[in-house]
């Protein structure tokens, strides 16, 4: 039995290794993000590339900032980052999490960098319509507040998490969710953002 389990783990590790190599090979094919045109009341939003996943920072309703992120419940929210959890998160529909954290201070790139505790490989300051930002923030906050009874805090990620109703997989990961949020804000996203390989362009 132990030999069989070890074989299964080796197989899963090999699959994960192949996946990571494939992700690395796609870094040259950046996903293009095209901003909306003719904004009447632009505000700054911040797209954060953390290496293999992404998150989005919006201006707060009454000042400050709010960071949102999406990920696998076991791996991302609970911090169970073992091989089995990683395999399940990538290749099986698993329970998902919505992360949220209010941040103080000015709505500037420097302030965002100073407040985020995990690594940021790239930070993109984007301009979006204030009304659309308010609508997205309200939708995400309503979703978050509706699951407050299950809220947990992950100190490593410095985020509060609640269950998200849409299952997580490699093909429905944080980068794809952030791309959807950008679409709500009026951005066009060209390419497959399965990996966090963002590039900002003019239309």
Image (cartoon, rainbow, N blue to C red):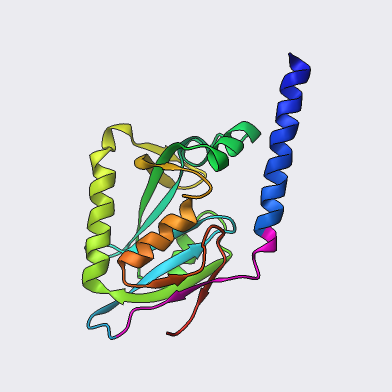
Name the residue at 75% across, 24% down.
6
Residue 54 % position (x, y): 49, 58
Which residue occupies 51% across, 54% down? Answer: 117
Q: Nearer the viewer, residue 158 or 58?
A: 58
Q: Position of residue 150 (x, y in %)?
A: 32, 32
Range drawn in magenta: 24-37
**Viewer-proximal residue, 69 or 108?**
69
Vertical relation: 11 (above or below) 117 = above
- Where, by quadrant of the figure, is residue 52 drawn? bottom right
Dividing the image into 4 quarters, which one contains the C terminus? bottom left
Magenta run includes residue 25: yes
- Is 15 a magenta residue? no
- On screen, residue 189 above or below 141: below
Q: Residue at x 29, y 45 (%)?
A: 144
Query: Is residue 56 visible to the viewer in this orientation of the structure?
Result: no
Farthest-out residue, top: 1
Query: Going by the picture, which residue comes out furthest to the right?
Result: 3
Q: Can residue 85 be seen from the camera position used here?
A: yes
In the shown orientation, is residue 115 left or right of residue 183? Answer: right
Give residue 158's position: percent from left, percent from top. Answer: 45, 47
């Amino acid at each position: 039995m132990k030999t069989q389990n070890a074989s299964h783990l080796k197989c899963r590790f090999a699959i994960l290794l192949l996946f990571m190599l494939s992700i690395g090979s796609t870094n040259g094919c950046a996903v293009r993000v095209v901003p909306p045109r003719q904004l009447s009341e632009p505000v700054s939003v911040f797209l954060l590339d953390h290496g293999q996943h992404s998150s989005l920072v919006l201006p707060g309703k009454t000042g400050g900032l709010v960071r949102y992120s999406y990920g696998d419940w076991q791996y991302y929210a609970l911090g169970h980052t073992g091989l089995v959890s990683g395999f399940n998160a990538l290749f099986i529909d698993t329970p998902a999490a919505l992360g949220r954290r209010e941040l103080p201070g000015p709505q500037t790139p420097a302030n965002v960098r100073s407040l985020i505790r995990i690594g940021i490989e790239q930070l993109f300051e984007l301009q979006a319509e204030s009304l659309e930002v308010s609508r997205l923030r309200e939708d995400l906050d309503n979703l978050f507040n509706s699951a407050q009874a299950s809220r947990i805090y992950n100190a490593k990620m410095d985020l509060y998490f609640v269950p998200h109703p849409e299952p997580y997989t490699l093909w429905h990961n944080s980068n794809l969710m952030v791309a959807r949020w950008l679409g709500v804000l009026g951005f066009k996203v060209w390419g497959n953002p399965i990996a966090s390989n963002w590039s900002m362009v003019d239309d």
